[in-house]
Structures are given as C-alpha cells and as structure tokens.
Amino acid sequence: MLREKLKGYNVILASGSPRRQQYLKELDIDFEVRLKDVEEIYPETLRGAEITDFLALLKASALTDIAGNDIVITSDTIVWYNNRALGKPKDYDDALAMLTALSGNTHKVITSVCLKTINNTVVFNETTSVTFNTLSEEEIKYYLDNYKPFDKAGAYGIQEWIGLVAIAEIQGSYANVVGLPIDKLYHHLKEIAFGI
C-alpha cells in the first residue's frame, strides 16, 4: 500500500547502516542510499534525545541537492546511560568499558529520525529502556572478539549473540534498539504519501 502511494517520490536513505537499510526493504518501498560524510559533533549542553535530534537534522542538512520529489531519511542512535551518551566505541578498550558499565544495569536507547523534503523538515524520536543481565568479562570479550560491534552505539547490536544472552527486559520498541523506530517512520511516510 505505502509502496504504491510513494511512487511519485524518490526516497533517499542517508545511512550506511545495513540494519536501517534492511528495515526499509522490509517496508517494501523503493529507496536509494546516498551517503555524505558528516562530522558528528554536537553542543555539550545537549542531553538525551536533544543529541540525536540535533545529529539527525545535521545529517539531513548535509544533503543540499534534493529535488522536488525527494524524501531524505536520516537517523542517529545513542545509548544513554548514567547521564551520558554512549556512541560508537573508539576502540576495543572503549567498547569493553561500555559493556562493562551496561552489564547488570538499565540504559536507554534513543533514536531520532529526520524526514526532509524540499518544503518541510520533520524530526521525531523514540526511547526504549533496556536492562542487561550481569555479564562476565569473559562473556563481554567473547562478544567483542567474535562480533566486533565497533560501528554500533553502546558497543552492541541487540540482534546479535549479546541480545540473546544479555537482555533481561525491554520496555518499548525493539526495532528502535536495532537502530530505527520503523513503526513511527512508517506513520510519517504515510502522512507524506497521503498528504495528511
């Protein structure tokens, strides 16, 4: 249904994330991937969803050559724990420190999405609460050695091994933890397509 309604639009996903690309494929809509390098720096005064909103908008603003029928989708995800943002780890030791901190505790996964057309820009976000079981150092190192989650916020992918053994509880959207609140995105794309 949405695929038919979006036929007059060119949907552009400005993300190299294979997980976000897979979710859009599963929505059964045509889209292209267009990447633009953006330095992901934000004001230190921002907190929680303010950070991801800012970065999603920053990524959308970097695509300046959009046409009248383009819909640009950008997104940003952080893990928010102990009043600080955990983005992608800098290296192995940073990833080890992140997962050690998350072990046995509850954190929030925050994802913001920006939809940009030539006439309008909309930013929305989703927050999911995730509680980890306590993990041993051996288990954390096994995950890091075998799955190398260095391109993921908070140094983990819930769809991988760690999601099977470490997740005690989730409150909110699972898809959001993977990296895209797909239900909200569907709703917003439907509004554009139906002109609501």
Image: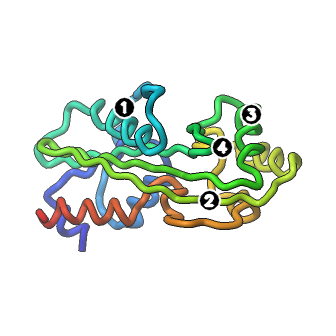
Q: Quadrant of residue 194?
A: bottom left
Q: Nearer the viewer, residue 8 or 160?
A: 160
Question: Residue beneath label 1, please?
Answer: 36
Between disc 2 and disc 1, the foreground one is 2
Residue 97, horizontal then vertical, whole percent = 75, 37
Q: Amino acid at mark 1?
A: Lys
- Residue 17, given in percent of the width and then of the height, sits at 48, 46
Residue at point 44%, 60% (across, down)? 23
Which residue is at 13% across, 58% downward? 8
Q: Are marks 4 and 1 in contact (CB under 8 Å)?
A: no
Q: Which residue is mark 3?
A: 92
Residues marked 2 and 1 touching at CB (< 8 Å) = no
Q: Earlier in the sequence, mark 4 or mark 2?
A: 2
**Sequence-first tag of 3 and 1:** 1
Mark sitting earlier along the chain (4/1): 1
Helix, strand or loop at label 1? It is: loop
Along the polypeptide, which appears first: circle 3 or circle 4?
Answer: 3
Q: Which mark is residue 130?
A: 2
State how far apart marks 3 and 2 are (Cα). Answer: 22 Å
Task: Name the N-terminal-most of marks 2 and 1.
Answer: 1
- Whichever of labels 3 and 2 marks the residue nearer the N terminus, that label is 3
Is the residue marked by circle 2 packed among few (<14), some (14-19), or many (20+) residues within 10 Å? many
Residue picked out by circle 4: 155
Where residue 44 sits in the image (x, y, percent)?
48, 26
**Is there CB contact under 8 Å for labels 3 and 4?**
no
Task: Tell me the kind of residue under disc 2.
Answer: Val
Lateral position of residue 142 relative to residue 4, left or right: right
| Residue type pointed to by label 3 | Tyr
